Amino acid sequence: MKSTEIQQLLNEYPLVKNLIELEEIFWFNPCNTTFKEGLPFVGLDANDVGDAEARLNRFAPYLCKAFPETEATHGIIESEIVAIPTMQKTLEQHYGVNIAGKVLLKKDSHLPISGSIKARGGIYEVLTHAEKLALQAGLLSENDDYSKLFSEEFRQFFNQYSIAVGSTGNLGLSIGIISVKLGFNVSVHMSANAREWKKQKLRSHGVNVVEYKQDYGVAVAQGRKEAEFNPDCFFIDDENSQTLFLGYSVAGARVKTQLEQMNMVVDEDHPLFVYLPCGVGGGPGGVAFGLKLAFGDHVHCIFAEPTHSPCMLLGVYTGLHDNICVQDIGIDNITAADGLAVGRASGFVGRAMERLLDGFYTVHDQEMYNLLGLLNRDEGIRLEPSALVGMVGPSRVSGNFDYLNSRNLSVDKMKQATHLVWATGGGMVPDDEMAKYLDAAEI
Ligand SMILES: *Cc1c(COP(=O)(O)O)cnc(C)c1O
């Protein structure tokens, strides 16, 4: 971007200056609408999410057999929600704000198979593709017991096909593991930020890992290129895929059931706030969509990003979406939050979801480490840095009366609020890596 263009952008959008200066900011979205008004702009609806749910149910017998760790949940990939009362007190002290209501943690960090939120979208898209191929070949019908896919015959069938994806690490991990299990040839194009152990783990599974010295955008472009020249290669497009998005969205109805089982009420007088770490946007966007379908206007979704990679905030705030990247305004996209190290947001998620999101904020890398250390100390839960950006949310919301008033959220309602911090990854981080993260915490 030319300096005159940046100046123009700054004149129109003053917060861009704070972004450039890598400040932690909180932007409440003035374009937020009611659920009813915003829904038509998504281009997907409850039927699409229902289809995804049904597909995952069809595959449950397969997953149960192929991944014994999913036996306990009968082949359904789901994580638990836990209260974190000691951490809640620590957050109040740490930020000097009273957090009314209750803070809960959604442990997608400990999802089976790949230990991150990507075990939702990534696995779902590979299953969707596998089902399509097997149905077309007449090897499968929707009424079959899908555990038959766990066989040499099917592995050989899928072995004629390949899958490619670009990733900062966790998407590659989930797509790599499920693809190899089904029998596909799979290439994961990894950005420079991707952790070494994630690459090694994939190679040990037999995945073709291609490494880049550049960031996520380049890794995705290369994956796309590989697939273009091979008609039997399916490219999973993290920047635009509605299938990935739908895989994530299934979480909404499940959270509703989980909160009901915990006797947590969500209604007009009991607001639910959900804090979602955002990279390219598919994960948090899909989850937020599912939550909106489940709770309507009673859920308030807020996206969180590193100060070095605020691509979604930048895209939605300026209305430029994927026509601008953080590098355009001189931000480096280098962060310890490898899962969020994305310079250009999805072309689809911001446009589809902007009316249904309450706001966006950014967090310093050091703050992620500090929260990582505090959560380990107080609750014995270990996450990767990306997964901690949501932890800042409850204090930012609770202290901001302009925002709360604008959404008609009175003090009485806030006393009955639920704050759900979405922990997106960390369950598979090796001990020596985790020790380094814990060392980086200044607590
Ligand atoms: C991928 C990822 C996210 C964000 O998901 P996007 O779809 O990229 O927005 C958040 N946290 C972790 C740990 C991730 O791996």
Image: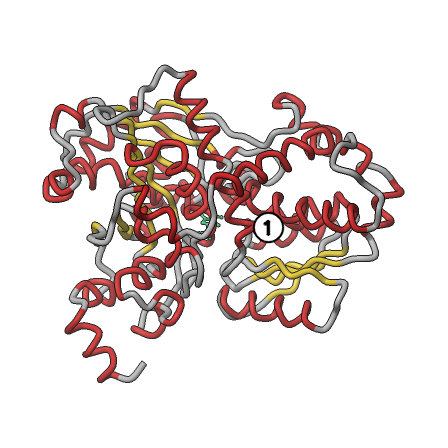
- Left or right, 298 with respect to 403, comes to right
Rendered position, 355 above or below 81: below
Q: Secondary structure at mark 1?
A: helix
Rendered position, 60 above or below 324: above
Please tell me in which quadrant of the rendered image residue 226 appears: bottom right
Amino acid type, label 1 = Lys
State the residue position of label 1: 198
The number of numbered discs placed on residues in the rendered structure image is: 1
Please tell me in which quadrant of the rendered image residue 73 appears: top right
- Left or right, 413 with respect to 291, comes to left
Tell me residue 19's x, y (percent): 24, 63
Ligand 1 neighbours mark 1 (CB distance < 8 Å):
no
Rendered position, 29 above or below 441: below
For the point 59% across and 40% down, which residue is it?
114
Tell me residue 7's x, y (percent): 19, 79
- Left or right, 45 with respect to 441, comes to right
For the point 30% across and 58% down, which residue is it?
313
Tell me residue 332's x, y (percent): 36, 68
Quadrant position of the C terminus in the picture? top left
Within 10 Å of disc 1 (Cα), the crowding (few <14, some 14-19, many 20+) is many
Q: For residue 432, say whether it is visible.
A: no
Between 48 and 155, the residue placed more toward the observer is: 48
Tell me residue 246's x, y (percent): 52, 45
Q: For residue 52, say whether it is visible.
A: yes
Quadrant position of the N terminus in the picture? bottom left
For the point 17% across and 26% down, which residue is it?
413
Between 334 and 407, the residue placed more toward the observer is: 407
Rendered position, 156 above or below 381: below
